[in-house]
């Protein structure tokens, strides 16, 4: 099981930071979208 996890992490390490950046961008967009109506 641990070897499978390490294999999966080693295969996806190249795109892991891109996935994290995309998730952060989605959170920022959601946060801004929910708070924009309060400004107007």
Image: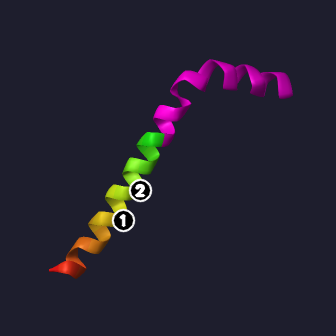
How many C-alpha atoms fall within 10 Å of the one at disc 1: few (<14), some, or many (≥20)? Answer: few
Please tell me whether residue 8 is drawn above or below residue 16 in the rendered image: above
Q: Main secondary structure of the magenta part?
A: helix
Q: Which residues are magenta?
A: 1-20
Residue 17 showing in the rendered view: yes
Which residue is found at the position 38% from the left and 48% from the top?
25
Q: How is the image coloured?
A: rainbow
Could you tell me which secondary element the residue under label 1 belongs to?
A: helix
Which residue is found at the position 14% from the left and 80% from the top?
40
Q: Which residue is mark 1?
A: 31
- Left or right: 2 with respect to 13? right
Residue 13, given in percent of the width and then of the height, sits at 60, 25
Q: Which mark is residue 21?
A: none
Q: Is residue 9 magenta?
A: yes
- Left or right: 14 with respect to 32? right
Q: Nearer the viewer, residue 3 or 24?
A: 24
- Left or right: 33 with respect to 12? left
Please tell me whether residue 25 is drawn above or below residue 30 in the rendered image: above
Occupied quadrant, residue 16: top right
Which residue is found at the position 38% from the left and 51% from the top?
26
Occupied quadrant, residue 21: top left
Please tell me whether residue 22 is drawn above or below residue 30 in the rendered image: above
Query: Marks 1 and 2, how far apart in space?
Result: 6 Å
Q: Which residue is mark 2?
A: 27
Could you tell me which secondary element the residue under label 2 belongs to?
A: helix
**Farthest residue, direction left:** 40
Residue 28, given in percent of the width and then of the height, sits at 37, 57
Residue 39, given in percent of the width and then of the height, sits at 20, 79
């Amino acid at each position: 099981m641990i070897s499978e996890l390490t294999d999966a992490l080693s295969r996806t390490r190249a795109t892991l930071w891109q996935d994290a950046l995309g998730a952060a961008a989605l959170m920022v967009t959601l946060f801004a979208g929910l708070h924009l109506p309060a400004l107007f």
